[in-house]
Image: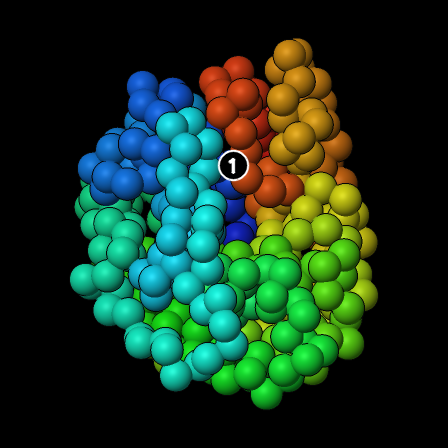
Amino acid sequence: MTGRERMLAVLEGRKPDRIPVFPNIHFGTARFGGMTIKEFSIDAKRNARCLIGACREFGYDAVKVGSDVTVEGEAVGSLVEFPEDNVPTVKIPFLQEPNIDKLCMPDPYKDGRMPMFLESTRIVAQTIGKDVFVASLMQGPLNCASQIRGLENLLMDFYDRPQFVEELLTFVVQLEIAFGKALIEAGADCLILGEALCSPSVISPDFYRKFVLAKEKELIGALRTAGAKHIDLHICGNINKILTGCVETGANILDLDWMMNVREVLQTEEIRKAGITGCGNLNPAGVLISKNPEDVVQEARKLLEENKEEGRFILSAGCNMQSDSVPANLRAMVEAVERYGWYVV
């Protein structure tokens, strides 16, 4: 089977020849491709070249197109800083004052770096999409809002200006619907919603349900209507307290952080009933920067053997892999599924 066939089989509830591996890496491929993270983050052709080159070299099953979390915020007007060899960050949020009337809806085909990631998605899909599953990164409502308003300001707004938060989240849902539609048109098989800030370590489960869950459901529903067959939700940390809410969003893939027990998640009634696939969850800041690749193989083996019979499992990192994981430990992830991920026919 090709990587694309393998991924689709799992996502459709069928058994592939082996468990697929989707490493959860984008900017981590920059150094492998001979460039800085800044170069990777601002040029579509360079971005795609690194992603394609690493996938071809190591032989994994799915590619993640993206570079950082600031893309949509920058398109709205936030000032983004680009270190030479680190990920871009918002230096000055656009909405320093809570004035919703200042917002203008960006055009994903014209504004900021959104067109760049449409082009990178297009290049990746046209070049290797026949054999490899292509997933493109966009931000969930809360993540996107934080890149426009600033995280500290936004967290205070939850208490001081709840109506403003509602209006801002309504705006970003429409922004992400437009961006998601454009990514689908560019050739993405899957949309990854980055929602790190929904972690219970950042906002309470009550706030998640009160402010964010309905917006995620609205966004995912609109993307489904636009033709998105596969939507991957990533929320950092231990999400057991909001797991039911994550199921309610309508996402059919859950990216699980390294501190989650994948087997326990896959065995919950809600996950099984919804047919959700679990993706994870090697520790990107732990075993995946080990200087001994066999450590990666053995940790991956545990995940493979624990979850093989559950089905609907994809081996991945619990969050973005770093450049230090390439090439040895990225190669080790693929080696692990080649050694221990096969199904007995």
Residue 272 visible (yes or no)? no
Q: What element carries label 1?
A: loop
User: In the image, is 174 to the left or to the right of 309?
Assistant: left
Residue depicted at 72% across the width and 51% down the height: 237
Which residue is situated farthest in the front direction here? 97
Which amino acid is tagged 1?
Answer: Pro
Residue sitting nearer the eye, 159 or 26:
159
The answer to whether residue 11 is above or below residue 337 is below
Residue sitting nearer the eye, 64 or 338:
64
Residue sitting nearer the eye, 327 or 46:
46
Q: Quadrant of the N terminus?
A: top left
Residue depicted at 45% across the width and 38% down the height: 87
Q: In which quarter of the image is the C terminus?
A: top right
Residue depicted at 26% across the width and 64% down the height: 108
Which residue is situated farthest in the top direction here? 292
Looking at the picture, the colour scheme in use is rainbow
User: In the image, is 242 to the left or to the right of 104?
Assistant: right
Residue depicted at 49% across the width and 25% down the height: 323
Query: Residue 226: x and y, percent?
Result: 33, 76
Residue sitting nearer the eye, 304 or 248:
248
Query: Residue 282: x and y, percent?
Result: 67, 35
Residue 282 visible (yes or no)? yes
Residue identifier under label 1: 23
Which residue is situated farthest in the bottom direction here? 163
Residue count near mark 1 (Cα–Cα under 10 Å), binned few <14, some 14–19, many ≥20: many
Write down the quadrant of residue 143 in the picture.
bottom right
Query: Residue 17: x and y, percent?
Result: 51, 40
Task: Give the mark count.
Answer: 1
Query: Residue 303: x and y, percent?
Result: 71, 37
